[in-house]
Amino acid sequence: MDYGKSGAARQGKSGPKHVEHNAKGTANNPFGARDAKAELVARMKAAAQAKARPDRDGAS
């Protein structure tokens, strides 16, 4: 059999089937955008205080 005459395989599509709503580089998730470290530390401190409050009161 002459396999050279059977034709080439179909190539795959180069892109994804759909686009994510929060893909990198979009308006919802721009490249390089990060929260400021001060904001992160403030959120972490607030979460730690909220978690520690019931323990100090003896309510838990």
Image (spheres, rainbow, N blue to C red):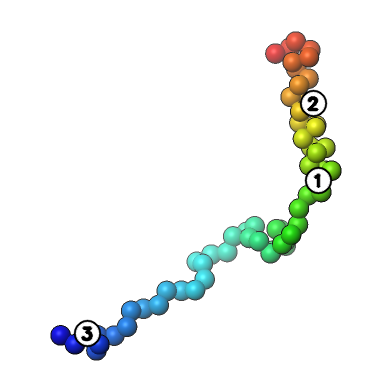
Say if mark 2 contacts mark 1, CB within 8 Å: no
Q: Position of residue 36 (x, y in %)?
A: 81, 48
Left/right placement of residue 34 relative to residue 4 reads right
Dot 3 corresponds to which residue? 3
Report the residue at 76% width, 31% height from top: 47
- In the rendering, which numbered label is found on residue 15? none
Q: CA distance from mark 2 to mark 3?
A: 72 Å
* Residue 37, picture quadrant: top right
* Residue 2, picture quadrant: bottom left
Q: Earlier in the sequence, mark 2 or mark 1?
A: 1
Report the residue at 80% width, 31% height from top: 46
Q: Is residue 41 above or below residue 60?
A: below
Dot 1 corresponds to which residue? 37
Q: Position of residue 9 (x, y in %)?
A: 33, 79
- In the rendering, which numbered label is found on residue 49? 2
Kind of residue at disc 1: Lys
Q: CA distance from mark 1 to mark 3?
A: 62 Å
Is disc 3 placed on a helix, strand or loop?
A: helix
Report the residue at 74% width, 24% height from top: 51
How many numbered circles does the render carry?
3
Q: Position of residue 11 (x, y in %)?
A: 40, 77
Q: Earlier in the sequence, mark 2 or mark 3?
A: 3
Q: Earlier in the sequence, mark 1 or mark 3?
A: 3
Report the residue at 76% width, 21% height from top: 52
Q: Is residue 54 above or below residue 11?
A: above
Kind of residue at disc 2: Gln
Judging depth in this view, the residue of 18 and 50 nearest the camera is: 50
